[in-house]
Amino acid sequence: MAQIRLECRNVAKRFGAITAVQNLNFKIADGEVVSLIGPSGCGKSTLLNMGSGLDPASEGEVLVDGEKVTKPNEHVAFMLQKDLLLPWRTIRQNVEFGLEIRGVPASERKAISLELLRKCRLPDFAENYPHQLSGGMRQRAALARTLAVDPAVLLMDEPFSALDAQTKMVLQQDLGRTLAETGKTTLFVTHDLVEAIALSDRVLVMSQRPGTIIEEIVIDIPGRENPMERRKSPKTGPYIAQLMSLLHIGEEVH
């Protein structure tokens, strides 16, 4: 049986009188990619903040590798919508930033960063600065930086939402291949239903606030490492319809 990397046990989060999420229970096994979808304001980003240790749960427990998350730790890496690359550092230096903080020797940092930039199709831009790269290239650099610290769990909060449709699909392809190669356990927040289906082993659906998991859908389409081909599967349409129904998308408002 695969090791459980990330787990929520009866988790709730309150902000004053407002309950953002409640009764959250789920497990993500080693190497799984799980997408989290739900209405705006249902607590998806709140859940990632708790998983990363940036914000404690009000009730229940969030665990990584069986240990309760109480603060940011080196076992979890967080990738956001914005790349947050440091403009005064080269792309290689940005990728090495977390390793530098951990005291990894310069030669080892460089070897790791160059290999990740190769995997993320940026080997020729290692010594460029962020302003010299396109938005899609910057997000690939951000992914390389996130993977450089070799996290047990990768949390991703709509990392491609600001990109145009074509660039977004290219980066989904890059991410699918990279996650398959590295075997990283990933929780991926998105509003894009096709993206969730194309990238994931499972999709967790959240309710309106206070958010809780109302459905778990196993994506029975082969080839998670190739999201572009998954998009073409005849099974994709029915999955989209199921998710739209659960989220009440397209229903008339009375």
Image (spheres, rainbow, N blue to C red):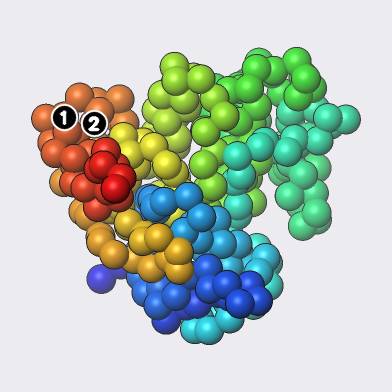
Q: Position of residue 208 (x, y in %)?
A: 40, 60
Please say whether residue 65 is visible from this viewpoint. Answer: no
Query: 102 or 211: nearer the eye?
Result: 211
Given the image, on which type of amino acid does mark 2 rest?
Answer: Arg
Residue positioned 44% across, 54% down in the render: 187
Query: Which label was assigned to residue 114?
Result: none
Disc 2/disc 1 C-alpha distance (Å): 5 Å
Residue 30, located in which quarter of the rendered image? bottom left
Label 1 amino acid?
Ser
Q: Nearer the viewer, residue 199 or 18?
A: 18
Question: Toward which corner of the image does residue 8 lie, by quadrant?
Answer: bottom left
Apparent side of residue 34 relative to residue 85 in the rendered image (left or right): left
Q: How many marks?
A: 2
- Residue 140 in picture, x, y percent from top left: 58, 30
Question: Do residues under tags 2 and 1 come within 8 Å of each other at their CB atoms?
Answer: yes
Side of 74 where 233 appears, left or right: left
Image: 121 above or below 18: above
- 212 w.r.t. 59: above or below: above
Q: Quadrant of residue 25?
A: bottom left
In terms of secondary structure, where does tag 1 sit?
A: loop
The residue under the point 52% across, 48% down is 156
Say which residue appears at 80% left-offset and 54% top-offset.
101
Quarter of the image containing the N terminus?
bottom left
> Is disc 2 placed on a helix, strand or loop?
helix
Q: Which residue is mark 1?
A: 233
* Residue occupying image coordinates x 39% and y 28%: 173
Tell me residue 35's x, y (percent). Answer: 38, 50
Residue 82 visible at all: yes
Q: Which mark is residue 230?
A: 2
Q: Report x, y in % for residue 216.
A: 25, 60
Seen in the picture, residue 80 relative to 129 is either above or below; the reply is below
